[in-house]
Image (cartoon, rainbow, N blue to C red):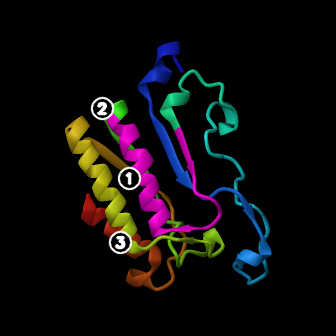
């Protein structure tokens, strides 16, 4: 931060898989071998804020929201987290601009998540539409979106990344 008060001017939220992955969950690496251990990168536990997102000592901890959904989640858990936690936090913060890092690797057909996370094309439309509405409500529609993740490009225009990105763009 440039000054101590800068931390009060930024709100950060991450919705992600977090927690221990066991062989019983059926997680597999791309080569089909079982995957077990902490869900990469192993940080971002619920309530964590501050340096390395593993402490709660940040002066802006109210402006850092880690929503760790466990190593396995799908549409219901994701939408509940957005409606119940992210959107109310944005309402309290009243942003001047929203910067969205759109990660499409949570798609059911993107094996980067070991087959544990089960979001669908419509989930990306839904969450983008909600964030676009928040941008209209609080910041004159100022929403910037950047591609963060999404790795399954097999199938060209029918690939999970292409479909997810198209759903996201339709909502914008």
- Measured as percent of width and height from the top left, residue 45 is found at 66, 46
Q: Nearer the viewer, residue 86 or 96?
A: 86
Q: Is residue 60 left or right of residue 28?
A: left
| Residue at which label 1 appears | 83
Q: For label 3, count other residues whose C-alpha is less than 10 Å away and answer few (under 14), some (14-19) or many (20+).
A: some
Q: Nearer the viewer, mark 3 or mark 2?
A: 3
- Measured as percent of width and height from the top left, residue 148 is found at 50, 56
Magenta residues, as a range? 65-91
| Residue at which label 2 appears | 96
Q: Residue visible at 31% across and 32% down? A: 94
| Residue at which label 3 appears | 122
Q: Residue visible at 54% across and 21% down? A: 1
Q: CA distance from mark 1 to mark 3?
A: 15 Å
Residue 74 colored in magenta in the image: yes
Are circles 3 and 2 on residues that touch, CB within 8 Å? no
- Measured as percent of width and height from the top left, residue 83 is found at 38, 52
Q: Residue visible at 49% across and 62% down? A: 77
Q: Return the mark for residue 132.
A: none
- Please tell me whether residue 102 is drawn above or below residue 107 in the rendered image: above
Image quadrant in which you'd find residue 38: bottom right
């Amino acid at each position: 931060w440039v000054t101590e008060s800068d931390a009060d001017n930024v709100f950060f939220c991450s919705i992600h898989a977090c927690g221990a992955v066991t062989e019983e969950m059926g997680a597999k690496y791309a080569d089909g071998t079982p995957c077990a251990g902490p869900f990469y990168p192993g940080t971002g536990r619920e309530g964590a804020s501050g340096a390395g997102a593993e402490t709660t000592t940040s002066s802006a901890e109210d402006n850092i929201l880690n929503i760790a959904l466990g190593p396995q989640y799908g549409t219901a858990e994701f939408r509940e987290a957005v409606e119940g936690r992210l959107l109310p936090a944005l309402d309290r913060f009243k942003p001047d601009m929203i910067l969205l890092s759109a990660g499409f690797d949570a798609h059911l057909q993107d094996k980067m998540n070991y087959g544990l996370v089960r979001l669908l094309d419509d989930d990306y439309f839904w969450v983008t539409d909600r964030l676009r509405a928040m941008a209209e409500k609080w910041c004159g529609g100022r929403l910037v979106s950047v591609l963060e993740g999404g790795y399954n490009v097999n199938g060209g225009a029918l690939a999970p990344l292409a479909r997810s990105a198209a759903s996201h763009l339709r909502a914008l």
